[in-house]
Image (spheres, grey):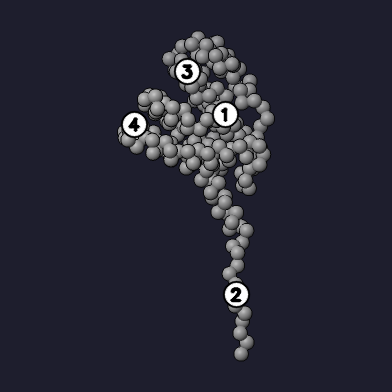
Amino acid sequence: MNTAPAMLPRDPPPAAIALRADAATREAIDMADGIDRIMGDRELYARMLKRFRSDYAHGALPIGAALADGDAVLAHRLAHTLKGAAGMIGAHRLHRHACALELAIRTDPPAQQAALAALAVPFDEVLHLLDQVLAGRAPEGCALEMPQRSLMQDPALLARLVQLLIDADGAAVDLLEESGASLRVILGEARLARVAKAVNDFDFDGALHALRQSGA
């Protein structure tokens, strides 16, 4: 009677390994999700990644410093801003931990330090992946054409906003709503907030002043 040779366990096919790796990468930064959030604008998304890496070069240290100084208001604002920024680029794990930290700062002071410590690993994962992407060494499935222009350059959009403010044209409100994502990348969260507040108060001179402070 012929006996079939015993079958040795085979290594999983490369596709399965790649799928697991991609899933882990997507948990750090889901680029497809991030691009979908801004209506498929890949160039804007690439600029958002560059802005995130620049804004969070020091990771969670500013939040930790605010907590150490007893400034819960600042720490909460920083955690809230991080939560929004992480969500916008599709950094799911970091977003969840930022949510937990924000909640702890607001409602459970004894849990603040543990929530802050838990933020470290996902933050490092995101920053490391962004370093790879920005250097053109992104993992498979994360290829993204990175624009070479400076983050602060978007002359057509800024020129349009400046002209509307000079004309005291209420259409500036619509422009801020329609192009908020682009302007957030160009100006940064805090500067855009100052401009938007002035525009919504119909203080066009104040909005121009805030805009010019940003280098526009």
Task: Return the residue nearer the eye: 26 or 211.
Answer: 26
Residue at the spot 50% in from the left edge and 38% down from the top edge: 123
Q: Quadrant of the C terminus?
A: top right
Mark positioned earlier in the residue sequence (3 or 4): 4
| Foreground label between 3 and 4 | 4
Instruction: Say what secondary structure mark 4 lies in.
Output: helix
Q: Are the residues at dot 2 and dot 4 in contact (C-beta closer than 8 Å)?
A: no
Instruction: Say what secondary structure mark 3 lies in.
Output: helix
Q: Which residue is mark 1?
A: 54
Say what amino acid the circle numbered 3 marks: Arg
Q: Is residue 136 visible?
A: yes
Q: Which residue is mark 2?
A: 7
Q: CA distance from mark 3 to mark 2?
A: 68 Å
Q: Quadrant of the N terminus?
A: bottom right
Q: Which residue is mark 4?
A: 106
Q: CA distance from mark 4 to mark 1?
A: 27 Å
Quadrant of residue 187 in the image?
A: top right
Mark positioned earlier in the residue sequence (2 or 4): 2
Residue 95 against residue 183 in the figure, above or below: below
Q: CA distance from mark 3 to mark 1?
A: 20 Å
Mark positioned earlier in the residue sequence (4 or 1): 1
Single out the residue that lies furthest toward the front. Answer: 68
Q: Is residue 33 visible?
A: no
Say what amino acid the circle numbered 1 marks: Ser
Mark positioned earlier in the residue sequence (1 or 2): 2
Q: Are the residues at dot 1 and dot 2 in contact (C-beta closer than 8 Å)?
A: no
Quadrant of residue 65 in the image?
A: top left
Mark positioned earlier in the residue sequence (3 or 1): 1
Residue 118 against residue 171 in the figure, above or below: below
Where does the image place residue 196, in percent across and percent down from the top left? Answer: 47, 19
